[in-house]
Amino acid sequence: MRRIRARAVRAAAGGAAVLSLLAAATACGGGTSASGGSGESSKTLTYWASNQGPNIEADKKILEPELRKFEKRTGIKVKLEVVPWSDLLNRIMTAATSGQGPDVLNIGNTWSASLQATGALRPWDEASLEKIGGRDRFVESALGSTGAQGQDPAAVPLYSMSYALYYHKKMFAEAGIAGPPATWDELVATGKKLSRDGTWALGAEGANLSNNIHQVFVLGKQHGADFFDAQGRPDFTSDGAVKAVKQYVDFMAEDKIIAPGNAEYAQNQSLSDFAKGRTAMVLWQAAASTFASQGMADDEWGVAPVPVASGAPGQGTSTNSMVAGINLAVFKNTRNVDGALKFVKFMTSDEEQRLLCSTYGSIPPVKAAQTDPAFDRPELKVLRSTLATSAQALPQVPNESQFETVVGTAVKNLFAAAAGGRAVSEESVRAELTKAQAQMAQG
């Protein structure tokens, strides 16, 4: 998803049709990577990193010393470009079409199956995985978001995350609320106490399509909906899917605990409101570094598992997060496979996983790296527990990126209706989801 904290996916127009086109283009071969060839180019890699930190310059400051370390050890220079999330998927698809792409790149883990279907990424067969230490080094839930089931992974996990409920301690104390809610009923009741005097209980980003998907996917699982059937066909209009979307939009439309203005919010705007004390709660992935960048001290906020319908988070209907994170992929057209594999091995080494994940506030998907005390602080304990016990991967289907676009847009439209004072009924929700499903069928 994100930056890990806000994976703002902008899927390319045409969805399935684009994927088919790219599959044909990359299957034809003949392209060259930006660092393809031999001689000097064999000692150079191009790396597209996703924006993980508060801004692109922060990422460069974090990553460039590590890339110099890799160059010193291997003699291979890495040319870094940090790509904003709003541009990354389109950049990847354009590169796949032209054959002019990076050697190694970050992808949102929810895109794995979609990009796998294009043929643009080099598959990770068992021999390739052994070159970076084998699949057993990685956490199972993270490997579950690396491509379609039954196929070699399209990427390997780099940074892992899950969602949590962040709450503003001072605002809770001033409202006489002892602690964070554990169920959705409690969240609404708590939220009504907090939504007063120009402040609001819960932040949302109605114009952030990927965040919309993350939230309604979790609620869908709690209502018994999967959004795709066993054959991978869209199933957006089931009773469970309708209930999930309505429940999320109703936090604004009916419960009045989300500000109407949040219908227009895009990436990270809800985090800014939280840090400035305008909202008391936010559902997010690893928000600590973003809060710190906005001047919020660690002791000003708390963290708890995302609420469920009832009971404690666990498997089945108590799923309370999608498996979030970033994967690392090798572009199929690279002419420097050996160097690319060495770079992936470096980035997923125990040493780099401890350093990079502790810096970014993420969880290492490499098991051995998780033993570092840096990952025992309260926030990451909640996120680690969620990943281990109650998170599920978004559907690993070829048209997942189109799903994020069309259903995310349906939720955006419903938030706009709520913000405009229009009723949001089961019928209006079902109508938006029916339109989204029709768009999927059209490709």
Image (cartoon, helix red, strand yellow):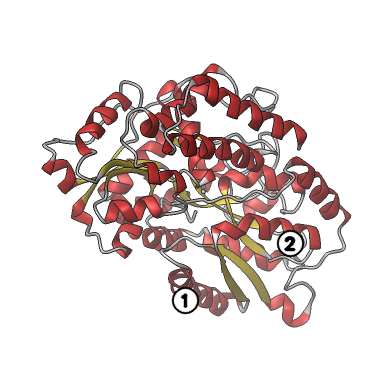
Q: Secondary structure at mark 1?
A: helix
Query: Counting other residues with Cα less than 10 Å from the Cα at mark 2, is it few (<14), some (14-19), or many (20 or more)?
Result: many
Q: Which mark is residue 95?
A: 2
Q: Residue at x 68, y 77 (%)?
A: 43
Q: Position of residue 77 (x, y in %)?
A: 61, 78
- Is the residue under label 1 in contact with that under label 2 (CB below 8 Å)? no
Q: Residue at x 75, y 64 (%)?
A: 334
Task: Give the mark nearer the N terminus: 2 vs 1.
Answer: 1
Report the side of 157 relative to 14 (left or right).
Answer: left
Q: Residue at x 13, y 39 (%)?
A: 175
- Tell me the residue that label 1 is attached to: 65
Query: Counting other residues with Cα less than 10 Å from the Cα at mark 1, is it few (<14), some (14-19), or many (20 or more)?
Result: few
Q: Position of residue 196 (x, y in %)?
A: 21, 40
Q: Position of residue 75 (x, y in %)?
A: 61, 79
Q: Residue furthest front?
A: 421
Marks 2 and 1, how far apart at CA: 27 Å
Comparing 50 with 283, the one in front is 283
Q: How many marks?
A: 2
- Residue 372 visible to an observer of this rendering: no
User: Which amino acid lies under the numbered mark 2 shown in the image of this protein?
Assistant: Ala
